[in-house]
Amino acid sequence: MEKRVLLTFNPGSSTIKLGLFRIEEGAARRFGSGMVDLRKSPLVLHLSEGGNTTDVSLKAEGGEDLTGLLDEMLDWLARHFSLDGVAAAGHRVVHGGDRFTKAISIDDDSLAAIEELVPLAPLHQPQSVRLIKALRHLRPDLPQTASFDTAFHATLADLVRRFALPREWHERGVKRYGFHGLSYKFISGEIVGRFPALAEGRIVVAHLGSGASLCALEGGTSRDTSMGFSTLDGVPMATRCGALDPGVLLHLMGRERLGRDEVEDMLYHRSGLLGVSGISGDTRVLLERSEAEASEALDLFALRMAGEAARLAATVGGLDALVFTAGIGEHQPEVRAAIARRLSWLGLDLDARANAENESVITTPRSRITGLVIATDEEQVIADEAILLVG
């Protein structure tokens, strides 16, 4: 069978992650990955293939139109990999609203609907739209698919989705959507394959990266999650505030006379760990610093994480396992330990050695709750869903 290639695009607010997959016997097998940090100048494409890494300097610039950047990236890839048989491109799209509850093939109508949702995810959605449009311009015949972060949470009960606002606003779409769904879908599958005894249980997954959220799974299905209407909600993040008393916004925009744009910039870019510490939003940096503000930011992070895990456990009526994933969750034992200490009252007994060595199981045999560390792979989910759609 001819080996064809599938590309995946996973855009962040200021980065583009690229996945390179070969389609073999109907399955997507990753053979490479890349990343471009749009904040850097000049831009560099960081590529990895097997154990080899390559940095490719790019002439193109980021911005509103990503056509030039994408054209240069694809040209370089075509000269170094066999990309003649590209079958499709799959995109991570953060917000699907109520319309998109599963992955879709992109056409004119669906692209217009995705673009209409930009105000609900202003940090990420615009990047997805730009990438889709740029690729359509460069390769108009190439099938493109969209995998939505909100889709995994379509199983939330109406009661869980609802805010205590007048009912009309719920009907107009002001409700809990949840995010990081591609990551949670991957973790749910990993639990089934690697820890089948836990698969039907009550599990809280903590996706801890620069963006962070938690999700309560019951039988592998999303029942509640920390992020709500927007990616600002829930726990504190690198630069985002997490859950905030709405009275604070009324105060800032009223008495303090801050404009909407200024408030938005503060909540998305100047809050969270960065705002509390005044040093950095990166937990790796804060762990190395001796200032009291750095410790306070990390302590607040652990406090809110543990509190949200307990709230989610209440939704599903108990807790059988706690899973840590994503950059912080997979690689920073100090942060995991701080969260675990605040959940010891629930019977979570951390194995210090296993945690320090980032093992898969990080709790002792006597722990009532199983603590797990599982690496996530959102691009694999995007690729798998794209294959199902393009055949």
Image (spheres, rainbow, N blue to C red):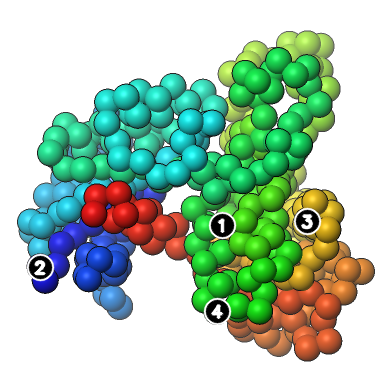
Residue 300 vs 124, above or below: the answer is below
- Mark 1 = which residue? 184
Question: Residue 2, which numbered label?
Answer: 2
Which is nearer the N-term, disc 4 or disc 3?
4
In terms of image quadrants, where is residue 255?
A: top right
User: Residue 220 at x, y = what percent?
Assistant: 61, 62
Q: CA distance from mark 1 to mark 3?
A: 16 Å
Q: CA distance from mark 2 to mark 1?
A: 32 Å
Q: CA distance from mark 4 to mark 3?
A: 22 Å
- Mark 4 = which residue? 194
Asked whether the residues under the numbered discs 4 and 1 touch, taking CB atoms below 8 Å apart as contact, a structural biologist would say no
Judging depth in this view, the residue of 58 and 226 nearest the camera is 226
Residue 133 vs 146, above or below: the answer is above
Disc 3 on helix, strand or loop?
Answer: helix
Number of other residues with Cα within 10 Å of mark 2, as a class: few under 14, some 14 to 19, many 20 or more: few
Horizontally, is 289 left or right of 62 in the view? right
Horizontally, is 232 left or right of 296 in the view? left
Q: Residue at x 29, y 36 (%)?
A: 106
Question: Residue 316, which numbered label?
Answer: 3
Number of other residues with Cα within 10 Å of mark 4, as a class: few under 14, some 14 to 19, many 20 or more: few
